[in-house]
Image: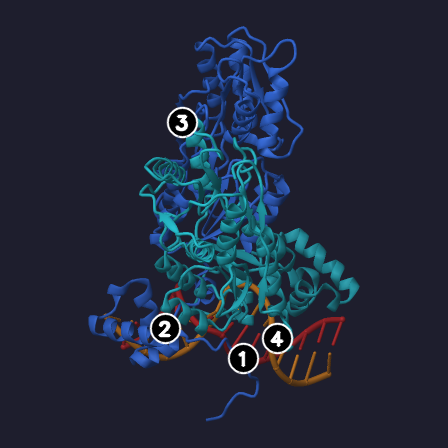
Chain colours: A cyan, B blue, C red, D orange
DNA sequence: CTGTTAGCGCTTTCAC
DNA sequence: GTGAAAGCGCTAACAG
């Protein structure tokens, strides 16, 4: 047998052909076995299974994806890894995706459109089957990259009036409006909205808009405050301290998230400022600590897990439809989920 | 020109050849440009750059990885996404890896050896350049998979006496021992250690061992408690409530992590149990909320960011050495990092 | 239900 | 410094 002069190292790993040889079938049959076990005869199934077991074979994702021009991953960009806000959504996405064999590619944008762009660019090279984005501001280049990729894009967390892609989210302006009305109904009038430190936190900005609209509807003057501190808890403390002192102290404060609100509560506790008597506090997110704080935190619970789950389901539906050349217009493109005001002690 | 009868769809995306054609160079030159800009002439560099810009070309990772048998990803398995404990380590890894162009593949094991095995198995198919694990218990199959993959493995968070791989971590038994001694020195005698709900939380178990050893050295009887609740904060409350009541209440409690300790503190606050007068509380982790709680939480700060950073650096060093056929025995295989007892009000 | 052949898009190897 | 050819490991397309 003449051997080619050119030699390449190869990875040394077990390949499909090794398995096929061991099972005395063709490579194609083994490939079919992986994609749909029942498309091969039962005797072969058993032989293949044994050969895989014996060799410890693991499919090479690269070769498969290259050949089929279909990635086995889903890219997801979130604003931030820590903070715990997105953890449940990520968990939901991985839970939902797992049975379908997709690997999650995760990147955080740090609330920056530039970093989001970099993440999307990196993803594209991985030919993800789809991309899930959390509703941040988007750079033009990112939009372009997404469009050129010709893959399903699902946006979650924010619900936009004019979505560019499939979206699964809740209305941030409505949260802002309802929080404001909730406080109004409980008798508070001097209601202040605290901005997040991240100016690009679109969700919080939208909640601010809702707050402002509601205040005007109620014939009240919207007042907002933007803390200087970059640290979440410190920012909450700073806001609470500033807004409860002075000549016309706030009667109630809406914080952009539970972390800031927790800072306020802990500050109140330490300074012996009575909440909600002196000043009511309302958060957003319903983090696990919210009902444990003293006083417990009145907040808004977004559908964190549900958003991830439905976003992932949309992705699966879309991919299946595209794969089978089915029409995609029966797939829901715009899912508005509800949130819940969780009434506790702080407001 | 005769066209092949067999046709495959192709992904439709811009390829290296498209760029090469536009720049009037060979594909190989463009490939070289990506791997090392200065290995091609400066005039070509400019033409290639322009062609890439114009086409919006993004390299196909699959084709490249398949051809070179070298993945462009690093797999990382952590016990849990939420909780905030590992977020900083993940951040450190991504920060450190980014300039080298590696994509992070992240999976959580949910503190389960089976899920860890599934994650590692999934990773292998992606031919990661290396794998970073957090020190959990490992199944035999996982060890086998890792060995067969022939790639660098770095373990972090836990520091083991007989490490199987390169490790970067701190000593959990030492943390348990030092926490115990710290409390002893401050006059506490009836010191109880609370177990985490996850029996597979190896780190916490090791801290428990350290605690037990220290107690015996001090001629005290080790007492441990295992809460029934699965919810972190609730488990802390449960432990605190149980251990401070009864005939011989605990004088000090060491919690396996700050979440449980926070639950205890908040319970004390609500029930008006004075901490540390009635019972001292010590945590582990130094989460951002630790110094904001009332009373502020005495805890232990592990080198969260540092571990991720050094683990990633080890990976980079190893990969570089392997790539250039350098000896790898100059690379530090065992890095023991220090932690810090953060003294605050609760103990 | 199973096998054969070609080729996905890139990089390795060799040649100039 | 640059190019041509071969092939990484798998799957689409076609044939039986």
Q: Looking at the image, is B3 positioned above or below residue B258?
A: below
Of labels 2 and 3, the one closer to you: 3
The residue wearing badge 3 is A271
User: In terms of depth relative to the viewer, which is nearer, A174 or A198?
Assistant: A174
- Badge 4 sits on which subunit? A
Give SS at disc 1.
Answer: loop
Task: Kindly identify which residue carries mark 4.
Answer: A328
Q: Is residue B341 left or right of residue B126?
A: left
In what element is the residue under mark 2? loop
* Distance from Cα at disc 1 to Cα at disc 3: 68 Å
Neighbour class for label 3 at 10 Å: few (<14), some, many (≥20)? few
Q: Which mark is residue B56?
A: 2
**A150 horizontally vs A327: left or right:** left
Residue A127 in the image, given as x and y percentages of width and height? 49, 66
Tell me the chain of label 3.
A
Q: Nearer the viewer, residue B254 or B302?
A: B254
Single out the mark in the foreground, 4 or 2: 4
The chain letter for the residue carrying disc 1 is: B
Of marks 3 and 4, which one's residue comes earlier in the chain? Answer: 3
The answer for how far apart the CA atoms under marks 4 and 2 are is: 27 Å
Question: Which class describes the residues within 10 Å of circle 2: few (<14), some (14-19), or many (20+)?
Answer: some
The residue that label 1 is drawn on is: B9
**Disc 1 or disc 4, which is closer to the eye?**
4
Percent of width and height locating residue B219: 54, 6
Chain-order first, disc 1 or disc 2: 1
């Amino acid at each position: 047998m003449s051997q080619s002069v050119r030699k390449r190292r190869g990875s040394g790993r077990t390949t499909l052909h090794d398995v096929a040889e061991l099972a005395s079938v063709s490579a194609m049959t083994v490939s079919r076995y992986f994609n749909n076990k029942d498309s091969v005869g039962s005797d072969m199934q058993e032989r293949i299974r044994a050969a895989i077991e014996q060799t410890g074979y693991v499919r090479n994702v690269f070769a498969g994806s290259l050949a089929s021009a279909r990635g086995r991953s889903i890219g997801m960009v979130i604003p931030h890894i820590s903070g715990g806000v997105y953890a449940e959504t990520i968990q939901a996405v991985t839970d939902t995706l797992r049975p379908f064999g997709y690997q999650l590619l995760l990147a955080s944008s740090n609330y920056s459109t530039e970093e989001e762009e970099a993440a999307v660019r990196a993803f594209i090279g991985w030919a993800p089957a789809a991309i899930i984005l959390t509703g941040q501001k988007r750079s033009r280049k990112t939009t372009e990259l997404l469009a050129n990729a010709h893959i399903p894009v699902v946006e979650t967390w924010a619900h936009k009036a004019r979505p560019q892609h499939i979206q699964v989210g809740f209305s941030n302006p409505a949260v802002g409006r309802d929080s404001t009305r909730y406080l109004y109904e409980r008798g508070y009038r001097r209601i202040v909205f605290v901005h997040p430190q991240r100016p690009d936190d679109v969700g919080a900005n939208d909640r601010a808009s809702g707050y402002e609209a509601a205040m005007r509807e109620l014939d009240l003057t919207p007042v907002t405050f933007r803390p200087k501190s970059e640290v979440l808890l410190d920012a909450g403390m700073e806001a609470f301290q500033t807004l409860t002192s002075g000549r016309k102290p706030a009667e109630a404060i809406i914080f952009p998230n539970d972390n800031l609100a927790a800072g306020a509560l802990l500050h109140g506790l330490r300074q012996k400022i009575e909440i909600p008597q002196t000043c009511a506090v309302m958060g957003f997110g319903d983090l696990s600590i919210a009902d444990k704080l003293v006083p417990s935190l009145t907040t808004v619970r977004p559908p964190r897990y549900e958003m991830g789950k439905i976003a992932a389901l949309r992705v699966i539906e879309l991919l299946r439809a595209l794969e089978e050349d089915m029409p995609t217009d029966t797939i829901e493109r715009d899912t508005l989920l509800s949130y819940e005001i969780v009434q506790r002690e702080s407001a």
